[in-house]
Amino acid sequence: MKTFTYTIRDKEGIHARPAGIVVQAAKKFASNIQITSKGKTTDLKRIFGVMGLCVKCGEQITITIEGADENEAAEALEKVFAGNL
């Protein structure tokens, strides 16, 4: 299992555009990928779940990845979050 945390820097938080980008990136991997914020967890491959977390600028999220391609997924998703949020 791989886990990393990230603090959202986008002034709009996780809104539709960046949510779509990270969901599409997550869907490329077979691993189970979860996002947690403020005690709530959802599947990172579901856009409405991600947007439903209502993550704002300055809030911290935790990404948990478990599966056969978890190392590759963690590396790719860290880059996606750093580049888009």
Image: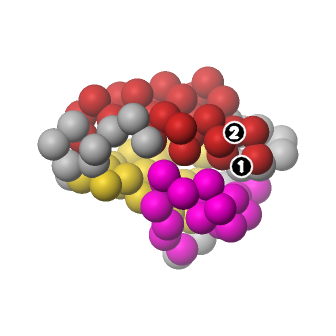
Determine which quarter of the picture holds residue 10: top right
Q: Are marks 1 and 2 in contact (CB under 8 Å)?
A: yes
Q: Which residues are magenta?
A: 40-58
Residue at the image position 55 percent from the left and 44 percent from the top: 23
The residue that label 2 is drawn on is 18
Q: How far across and how far down the image is residue 45, in percent? A: 48, 52
- Which numbered marker is on residue 6? none
Quote the CA–CA distance across marks 1 and 2.
6 Å
Any part of residue 74 in sight? no
Q: Amino acid at mark 2?
A: Pro
Q: How far across and how far down the image is residue 77, in percent? A: 45, 34
Q: How far across and how far down the image is residue 83, in percent? A: 61, 24
**Image position of 77 with respect to 51: above or below:** above
Determine which quarter of the picture holds residue 74: top left
Residue at the image position 69 percent from the left and 39 percent from the top: 18
Between residue 28 and residue 35, name the one nearer to us.
Answer: 28
The residue that label 1 is drawn on is 14
- Quadrant where the image shows the C terminus: top right
Residue at the image position 65 percent from the left and 42 percent from the top: 20
Q: Look at the image and say whether residue 35 sits in the magenta stretch.
A: no
Residue 30 lies left or right of residue 6; in this view the side is: left
